Image (cartoon, grey):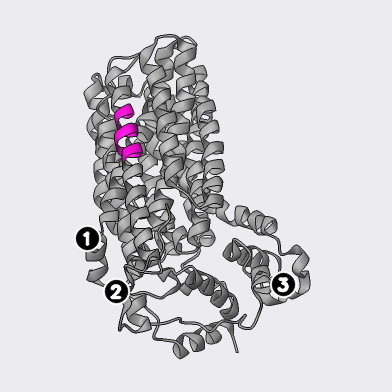
C-alpha cells in the first residue's frame, strides 16, 4: 500500500477531526515511555523528517532512519542542525522581502530623487507611505488565502509578483510611476511576513516558536546589512546600459527575488495535516506532539465565519496590536532612514555614497545576532514580556543618544542600541501573540490583524523625519512608541494574562467545561481552563 493510500485510510478512519472533533490519527508510538518518545520527537521533529527522510534516502521512512541510526544520534543538536538547513529557505524569502521594501533608502542617497524629479521631502515620504497603506489593507486576508491555497503555492506566487514589481521600479521615470510601483509592492508583499509566522506557529509547540520566529525575523536585520553591502557594490554599475546606480539596485535585487521565488515552489511545504512528504506514521507523530501542546493546528480545520468573529472579539487581539505597533513604526523608520541618518552624522564625507552605505551594516549585524539570542533565551525560560520591556528601554536609550547630541560617534553608537531595542521585539511579539491564541483560522486572523495594524504604523515612520542631522520629530516619535506602546502594552498584556492564569489554576474557569463533550471542550480553543497563557 502506498503512503498516499495509508494517509487516506487514516484520515477516513478518523474523519471527525476539526475543532468540533477529536484526534485524526492514532498514536504510532503508543506504549513507549516518555524517554523513548522523546528520542523520536526531539525538537524540532518536523524539519528533521524532511532533511533525513528526503535528502539522504527518500525511499525510507523516518522509522527506518531512526532504527538505522540509533538513539545516540537522536539529539536536539542534530535536529537543530537539520532545522537550520530546511528553514534557510524561509529565511531567504524573508530576507529578500525586507531587502525589497527598504532598498529605496539606499536608492535615495544614490540620487533617486534628483533623477526622477522628486524635489521635496513630502513627495519622497509619500512613496514610503503608500507602501504601508496597501500592505495593511491586504494583509489580514492573506493568512486565510495562505490556508486555502496552501503555502507551497501562495508564497512563491506572491514572491514572483513583487519581484517583477521591483524590477519595474528600476525603470520609473517620475514620481507618479514610483508611487504606483510602491503601491503594488506593498500589495504583493503583504502575505509573506504574517503568512510565514502563521505557518511556523502551526508546526511548532508554543515553547519552540519564539526562537523560530526570531531566526526567521533575523533575516530582516541581515537584509539591512546585506542591503547596504549590495547597494554599495551595485552603485559601481552607475551608467552601465545608460541607467543610474539606483536603477540597477532595483533591477538586480528584483531579479534575485524572482529567481528565489521560482526555487521556492520546491522549497516550501504545507501544513502538518497536509504534508505529503511525510509518511502516515511520521505525520501522526508531528500532529500528536501538537495535540499534546493543546494546539488546534493539529487538526484539519475548515474555515467558518465564527472564527473571524472570535478573533475580532478577543481582547488579546487589541492588546497585541498595541504592543506590535511599538517596534514596527521604529523598525520601518530605522530601516528606511538609517542611510540618511548616518549620512547626516558626517562620520565620512556626505558625498561618499559607498562608505555611507557600508556604515549602515554593523548595527544590522548586531541586531540579527541578538534577535536569535533573545529568541532562544525566551524559549528556554518560556517568557516573552520581560524581554519586550527590556528591549523597549534599550531602544529608547539609543534614540535619546541620537537626539540629544551632534557628536557623530555618540549618535552612531545610538544606532546600535536602537537596533537592539527594535529587532528582537518584533519576533518576540509575534511569538507571544501566537502562543496565546488557539484555533488555526482564529490565530491566522489575529496575526493578520496584529501585523497589519503594526505595518499601518509605517505610515507614521514615513512622515516624521525632517530637519537632519538630529531629526527631533522622528526620534522623539520613536521614543514615544517604544515606551508607551511597546513597554506599556507589554506590561499590560503580561499583567492581564497572569491574572487569568491564576484564575484557571485556581479552578475558577472550570465551569466552562461542565457538561461538555470532548469535542465541545476542544472547540473552546484558548478559552479552555487547561490552556495556560505564556507570559
- Residue 432 in the figure: left or right of residue 317: right
| Sequence-first disc among 1 and 3 | 3
> What is the secondary structure assignment of the residue under circle 2?
helix
Of tags 3 and 2, which is closer to the observer?
2
Which residue is labeled 2 in the image? 512
* Image point (41%, 69%), residue name: 530
Classify the position of the N terminus by image quarter. Answer: bottom right
Q: Nearer the viewer, residue 42 or 15?
A: 42
Marks 3 and 2, how far apart in space? 44 Å
Place residue 30 in its image quadrant: bottom right
The image position of residue 154, as x and y in percent, is 39, 60
Magenta stretch: residue 487 in it?
yes
**Callout 1 crowding tier (Cα within 10 Å): few <14, some 14–19, many ≥20:** few
Asked where in the image residue 339 lies, by quadrant, the reply is top left
| Residue at figure coordinates x 35%, y 65% from the top left | 526
Considering the numbered disc 1 on the image, is that residue within a helix, a strand or a loop? helix
> Which mark sits nearer the N-terminus, 3 or 2?
3
Residue 173 coordinates in the image, percent (x, y): 29, 30
Cβ atoms under marks 2 and 1 closer than 8 Å: no
In this view, the mark in front (1 or 3): 1
Q: Which mark is residue 313?
A: 1
Magenta span covers which residues? 478-488
Residue at image point 37% right, 53% down: 498
Q: CA distance from mark 2 to mark 1?
A: 18 Å
In the depicted view, which residue is nearer to us: 493 or 472? 493
Q: Which residue is mark 3?
A: 65
Label 2 neighbour load within 10 Å: few <14, some 14-19, many 20+: few
300 is higher (above) or lower (below) than 341: below
Left or right of 306? Residue 62 is right
Amino acid at each position: 500500500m502506498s503512503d498516499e493510500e495509508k494517509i487516506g485510510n487514516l484520515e477516513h478512519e478518523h474523519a471527525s477531526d476539526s475543532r468540533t472533533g477529536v484526534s485524526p490519527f492514532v498514536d504510532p508510538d503508543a506504549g513507549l515511555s516518555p524517554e523513548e518518545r522523546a528520542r523520536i520527537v526531539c525538537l524540532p521533529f518536523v524539519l528533521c523528517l524532511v532533511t533525513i527522510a528526503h535528502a539522504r534516502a527518500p525511499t525510507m521512512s523516518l522509522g527506518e532512519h531512526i532504527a538505522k541510526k540509533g538513539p545516540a544520534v537522536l539529539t536536539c543538536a542534530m535536529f537543530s542542525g537539520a532545522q537550520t538547513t530546511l528553514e534557510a529557505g524561509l529565511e531567504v524569502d524573508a530576507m529578500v522581502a525586507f531587502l525589497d521594501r527598504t532598498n529605496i533608502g539606499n536608492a535615495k542617497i544614490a540620487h533617486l530623487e534628483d533623477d526622477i524629479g522628486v524635489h521635496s521631502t513630502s513627495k519622497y515620504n509619500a512613496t514610503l507611505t503608500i507602501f504601508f497603506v496597501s500592505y495593511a489593507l491586504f494583509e489580514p486576508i492573506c493568512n486565510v488565502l495562505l490556508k486555502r491555497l496552501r503555502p507551497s503555492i501562495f508564497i512563491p506566487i506572491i514572491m514572483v509578483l513583487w519581484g517583477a514589481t521591483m524590477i519595474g521600479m528600476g525603470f520609473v521615470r517620475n514620481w507618479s510611476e514610483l508611487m504606483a510601483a510602491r503601491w503594488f509592492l506593498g500589495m504583493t508583499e503583504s502575505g509573506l511576513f504574517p503568512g510565514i509566522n502563521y505557518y511556523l506557529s502551526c508546526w511548532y509547540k508554543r515553547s519552540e516558536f519564539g526562537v523560530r520566529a526570531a531566526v526567521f525575523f533575523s533575516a530582516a536585520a541581515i537584509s539591512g546589512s546585506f542591503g547596504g553591502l549590495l547597494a554599495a557594490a551595485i552603485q559601481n554599475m552607475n551608467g552601465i546600459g545608460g541607467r543610474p546606480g539606483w536603477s540597477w539596485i532595483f533591477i538586480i535585487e528584483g531579479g534575485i527575488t524572482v529567481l528565489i521565488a521560482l526555487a521556492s515552489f520546491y522549497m516550501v511545504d504545507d501544513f502538518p495535516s497536509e504534508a505529503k512528504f511525510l509518511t502516515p506514521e511520521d505525520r501522526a507523530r508531528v500532529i500528536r506532539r501538537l495535540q499534546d501542546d493543546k494546539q488546534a493546528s493539529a487538526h484539519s480545520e475548515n474555515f467558518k465565519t465564527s472564527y473571524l468573529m472570535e478573533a475580532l472579539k478577543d481582547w488579546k487581539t487589541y492588546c497585541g496590536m498595541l504592543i506590535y505597533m511599538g517596534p514596527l513604526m521604529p523598525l520601518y523608520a530605522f530601516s528606511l532612514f538609517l542611510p540618511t541618518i548616518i549620512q547626516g552624522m558626517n562620520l565620512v564625507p556626505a558625498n561618499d555614497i559607498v562608505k555611507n552605505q557600508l556604515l549602515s551594516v554593523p548595527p544590522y549585524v548586531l541586531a540579527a545576532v541578538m534577535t536569535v539570542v533573545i529568541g532562544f533565551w525566551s524559549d528556554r525560560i518560556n517568557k516573552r514580556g520581560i524581554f519586550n520591556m527590556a528591549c523597549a528601554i534599550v531602544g529608547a536609550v539609543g534614540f535619546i543618544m541620537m537626539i540629544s547630541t551632534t557628536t557623530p560617534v555618540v549618535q552612531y553608537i545610538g544606532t546600535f542600541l536602537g537596533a537592539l531595542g527594535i529587532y528582537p521585539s518584533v519576533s518576540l511579539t509575534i511569538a507571544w501573540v501566537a502562543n496565546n491564541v488557539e484555533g488555526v483560522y482564529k490565530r491566522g486572523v489575529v496575526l493578520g490583524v496584529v501585523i497589519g495594524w503594526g505595518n499601518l504604523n509605517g505610515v507614521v515612520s514615513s512622515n516624521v523625519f525632517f530637519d537632519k542631522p538630529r531629526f527631533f520629530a522622528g526620534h522623539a516619535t520613536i521614543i514615544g512608541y517604544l515606551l508607551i506602546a511597546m513597554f506599556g502594552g507589554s506590561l499590560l498584556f503580561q499583567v492581564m494574562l497572569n491574572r487569568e492564569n491564576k484564575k484557571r489554576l485556581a479552578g475558577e474557569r472550570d465551569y466552562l467545561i461542565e457538561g461538555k463533550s470532548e469535542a465541545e471542550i476542544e472547540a473552546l480553543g484558548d478559552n479552555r481552563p487547561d490552556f495556560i497563557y505564556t507570559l
